[in-house]
Amino acid sequence: MSQGLRETIADWLLALAAPLLLVSLFLTWSHQFTGAFAARYRPAIQGVPRDPTAWQVYSIADVFLAVVAVALMALALWGGRARRLVVALLLAVALAFTVHAASVPPTNGAVVFDSSATPPGYVANGATSGAGETVALVALILGAAGVALSFTVAL
């Protein structure tokens, strides 16, 4: 494969990954409550989004992922070895964060104490991950592939 073709493919992977990562931030990142939980404890959880986006669940991580998306696009447009190294590090951190978020679904900390339960205690909300993490993982993998391929261009 020629150097020019590798560079073009790398740039397209990066250019595709950037908006895909941004879109993932607007998708559901967590299904915080099961339907039964929401029905039973509706007054206690009123005002808490049942299916929040990354913007609703995170305060810093969402901004970090948006910065990674901008960095991916900047790398696609301007390249450079130093930029590739920085973006590779950002991608590693973002990928680790997103894998963790998919395995431990994020919630915004809403907990319910049920004094009528036997024994009384906090109720598990049944949080599950949403499509946002999956789309973010795909975007980050595409971005990592683009960065890895761009390193071969400079060889």
Image (cartoon, rainbow, N blue to C red):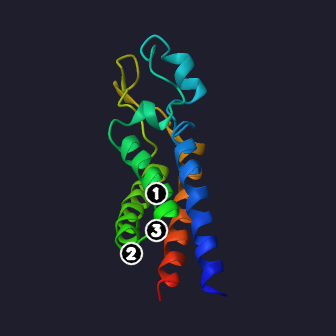
Disc 2: CA contacts within 10 A as few (<14), some (14-19) or many (>=20): few
Disc 1 on helix, strand or loop? helix
Q: Is residue 92 left or right of residue 147?
A: left
- Residue in front for this viewpoint, 51 or 44: 51
Q: For mark 1, what is the residue?
A: 74
Disc number at residue 79? 3
Q: Please tell me which residue is depicted at 44% across the width and 30% down the height of the picture.
A: 56
The answer to whether residue 124 shows anywhere in this view is no
- Residue in front for this viewpoint, 125 or 21: 21
The answer to whether 26 is drawn above or below residue 95 in the figure is above
Disc number at residue 30? none
Disc 2 on helix, strand or loop? helix
Q: Please tell me which residue is depicted at 54% across the width and 77% down the height of the picture.
A: 149
Disc 3 on helix, strand or loop? loop
Q: CA distance from mark 2 to mark 1?
A: 13 Å
**Rendered location of residue 27, percent (x, y):** 57, 37
Tell me the quarter of the picture where residue 62 sits.
top left
Name the amino acid type tagged 1: Ala
Pointer 2 with pointer 1, Cβ within 8 A = no
The answer to whether 150 is drawn above or below residue 131 in the figure is below
Q: Is residue 35 left or right of residue 91?
A: right
The answer to whether residue 70 shows anywhere in this view is yes
Disc 3: CA contacts within 10 A as few (<14), some (14-19) or many (>=20): some
Q: Please tell me which residue is depicted at 60% across the width and 26% down the height of the picture.
A: 35
Name the amino acid type tagged 2: Arg
**Rendered location of residue 70, percent (x, y):** 45, 50
Q: For mark 2, what is the residue?
A: 81
Q: Please tell me which residue is depicted at 44% across the width and 60% down the height of the picture.
A: 95
**Rendered location of residue 26, percent (x, y):** 54, 36
